Image: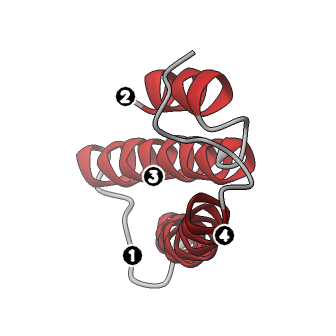
Amino acid sequence: MTVLAYFFSISTLGGKLKKDILLLFVALITQYLADAVYLSNTMNETWRPGGFDDLLYLVSYAMMGLTLITVGRSAEEIRKYANGSAIDLTKAT
């Protein structure tokens, strides 16, 4: 879905959300890695609180939070352009 949103952003919105969607993609990959490390440690019974997998979870959730903040800012910028007629967002290219 993020790849589709990335290409949609480039073609329709003029690339305004390009960096935000890439950040979301990296956050999702980090989340996947955190889940894989946690499951591996749990299956091998080597998991302990405050380990490397908890650090990965912290980083991935921080990246997702940062993504929400940047998407909100970009959406405000897009609304300003749409209201000011600087770019026409109603036409799909």
Q: Is residue 50 left or right of residue 85?
A: left
Alpha-carbon span between mark 2 and mark 4: 23 Å
Q: Earlier in the sequence, mark 3 or mark 2?
A: 2
- Say which of marks 3 and 2 sits in front: 2
Q: Secondary structure at mark 3?
A: helix
Q: Amino acid at mark 2?
A: Met
Give the Cα separation between the discs numbered 3 and 2. 15 Å
Characterize the local packing of mark 2: few (<14), some (14-19) or many (20 or more) Cα atoms within 10 angstroms. few
Q: Which numbered tag is attached to residue 48?
A: 1
* Element assignment for label 4: helix
Question: Does the CB distance between marks 2 and 4 fall below 8 Å?
Answer: no
- Mark 1 or mark 2, whichever is nearer to me: 2
Q: Reading the chain from its start, which is encountered first: label 1 or label 2?
A: 2
Applied colour scheme: secondary structure
- Measure the C-alpha gap from mark 1 to mark 3: 18 Å
| Image location of residue 30, percent across then percent down | 56, 50
Task: Indicate the amino acid at tag 4.
Answer: Glu
Q: Which mark is residue 31?
A: 3
Q: Which residue is mark 4?
A: 77
In the image, what residue occupies the spot 63% across and 66% down? 74
Q: Residue flagged by tag 3: what amino acid is it?
A: Gln
Task: Report the Cα–Cα distance between label 1 and label 2.
Answer: 33 Å
**Disc 2 target residue:** 1
* Image quarter hosting the C terminus: top right
Badge nearest the viewer, 3 or 4: 4
The residue type indicated by label 1 comes to Arg
Residue plotted at (61% across, 61% down): 78
Residue at the spot 37% in from the left edge and 65% down from the top edge: 47
Residue 42 rendering spot, x and y as whole percentages: 27, 54
Question: Which sits earlier in the primary sequence, circle 1 or circle 4?
Answer: 1
Q: CA distance from mark 3 to mark 4?
A: 28 Å
